Image (tube, coloured by chain):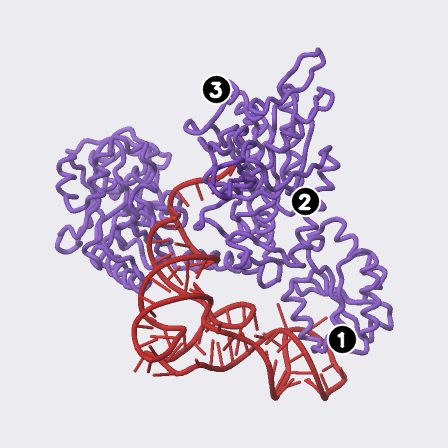
Amino acid sequence: MLEEITLSVDGKQREVNAGTTGAELYFDDREVVVMHVDGVLRDLARPLEAGTEVKRVTIDSPAGLEVLRHSTAHVMAQAVQQLRPDAKLGIGPYITDGFYFDFDVEEPFTPEDLKALEKMMLKIVNQNQKFARRVVTEDEARTAMANEPYKLELLSKTNEADEAGEGVNVEVGAGEITIYDNVDRKSGDVIWCDLCRGPHLPNTKLISNAFALTRTAAAYWLGSEKNKQLQRIYGTVWPTKADLKAYQERLAEAERRDHRKLGAELDLFSFPDELGSGLPVFHPKGGIIRKTMEDYSRQRHTEAGYEFVYTPHITKGHLYEISGHLDWYKDGMFPPMHIDETRDPETNELLKPGQDYYLKPMNCPMHNLIFRGRGRSYRELPLRMFEFGQVYRYEKSGVVHGLTRVRGMTQDDAHIYCTREQMKDELTSTLKFVLDLLKDYGLDDFYLELSTKDPEKFVGSDDAWEEATNTLAEVAEASGLELVPDPEGAAFYGPKISVQARDAIGRTWQMSTIQLDFNLPERFELEYQAADGTRQRPVMIHRALFGSVERFMGVLIEHYAGAFPAWLAPVQVVGIPVAEAFNDYVSEVIAKLREAGIRAEADLGTERFPKKIRNASKDKIPFVLIAGGEDAEAGAVSFRFRDGSQDNGIPVGEAVERIITAVKNREA
RNA sequence: GCCUCCUUAGCUCAGUUGGUAGAGCGUUUCACUCGUAAUGAAAAGGUCGCCAGUUCGAUUCUGGCAGGGGGCUCCA
């Protein structure tokens, strides 16, 4: 007679025989691939214990997908070691939308290898191998992994697994050491095994054929530049082929929106080789977008009480010694220009020492000099200085990327000097200002990130950091937006809130940052005279809304897929006559629009009418105005919108008004 | 910076097992005068990224450099 135990199964109390496994419990429920036991993800093969709370996990749930992806990584590693017996295993965790596995191999993988591996994986999947968990002692694990030097290294790190990061944790876990065997269904032989925390799917068959190996790359062992680089293979896997297709379509959509591609197609900007990596030039059409973005930003900053300043692109190095940037970020700065040194032409003796000038990597120290330029009164605070400041950063060659990571960029940078008492209100209104303005540019789905002190990289007292961090946290929470912590993500001088925006296809971009800084005012000895006559140190708020104008434009291009709202579109209206006979009529309409300040062009070329429509469509023109005999007689035009819809016979005066209104109201 | 792949006309891409190259789009010209995503014809346009080496001969092979893609690390 078997002993019975009581469990909570998906919220209901049930009696089962002692030793019942999840697989037996969910025998009739084919969708269940793994289970939560008291909130911990477990293999279905694990026997259940009395009093625990068991919940079903299906393959299409978030946890189920993680397990599917991790199990597929194992299948891939098995295939790799069949194809390349020399391959030593690194780690192989699940990631967003897929998985990867690192290998130490003599020769990097080729695209042909990936194809061969996919075939081998499908074979393994169809063999329906069993994933079997086995608890081992450290010695047993060492024996099993004798040929896997990286796994042995992980075993010696077991105790520090938590510190070594998520990847390591997935491999070895905390507490007991487990190995997962891939077992042949017929013979019961162990075909392959890996040191792994699990859990896994019960068998490989559940993986089906909705997977693909996507790319190869190099990655440092344990993520450290100091370690050897391993070869990484990325893959993706989904519960069904349709899910895989949908994912691939999402990638294709992202590729269609790529700002680098659209930037060339729409003639917005380029990166001439002659200038150097990461140094863009804006063509006339990109220039209009950029100017419109900047003009509107200036207008709003004026309204919000900012004052405009201008500072030079280069400076003597001493400025960045005061600020501390040369201590912390020298590697990220262009090397200095050494000038004004004089030597004796004969003896080469140094007659006059030179000076080191640097391209500026940031504007704040210069703004501080303006603040310090004369005595300041509490009556002037908050003092808000704004500048479209061009800065230059020596980004490593491998990280430069389109407009989103450049070496020369324009920050919409402002520094607000205020008292401690004003700090919280000022932060609150700044955050509101930032969010409102982002909305005007068409981004309206946000969350916030709070970056806190990096214990390795900071200046200033713990008290100041704590106060700054708490204030920022309060302001962020009061905004009502979702707040995600970013431990150790702060700059050396103070904590920050960053605004993350989701674009039209759901990707998130870090946009604006608001940083609180008690340290630079100290280093620059900034002071104001308070009402009681004492000298006080102001608090400094750094904030950038676009981050960089270049990057923000890149994000907007991707967000709008190049189809900018009328107020930002380089060409807002194209007039197309149905036939040459109506050229004059269309020209008159376009002239009226231009008088009203609309960027309008008449297409009077020799192309045929349908071709002109096609061209305007490809150029993503917001409003196409068409006119032929009927329209001319009626003193009207026909609207053709970007989506192909149409509004015919609109009187010219009304059409002009409609366009002006749409631009003025920044309609989408 | 590291690993890996790539660079042929303004753009997208063929091609040459080493004998200096081709298409489509775009551009120019001519003809057509046309109501909603490509009218036809002709022409122009290339030091095959740059510099070396091997070779009788290099766009092709080798090396270096530059620029780019995908990752890693980094991102004040």
Please rate how many residues cluster around mark 3, counting C-alpha atoms within 10 Å: few if below 14, some from 14 to 19, many from 20. Answer: few
Residue A427 lies in quadrant: top right
Classify residue A72 as left or right of residue A447: left
Residue placed farthest to the top in the image? A532
Q: In whole angstroms, how far apart are the C-alphas of marks 3 and 1?
A: 72 Å
Identify which amino acid the numbered label 1 is placed on: Val
- Which numbered disc flags the more N-terminal residue, 2 or 1? 2
- Residue lying at 55% horizontally and 59% vertically, measured from the top left: A272
Q: Is residue A72 visible?
A: no
Q: In this view, does A259 lie to the left or right of A246?
A: right
Numbered label attached to residue A462: 3
Q: Closer to the N terminus: mark 2 or mark 3? A: 2
Q: Which amino acid does label 2 sit on?
A: Asp
Q: Please, which chain is the residue tagged with disc 3 on? A: A
Instruction: Report the front residue among B37 and A229.
Output: A229
The image position of residue A250, as x and y in percent, is: 48, 56
Which chain is displayed in red in the rendered image?
B
Where residue A191 sits: x, y (%)? 16, 53
Q: What element carries label 3?
A: helix
Q: What is the distance, in whole Å, between disc 2 and disc 1 at their CAs?
A: 36 Å
Closer to the camera in the image, B5 or A370: A370
Q: Which residue lies furthest to the front in this view?
A: A346
Say above or below: B22 vs B37: below
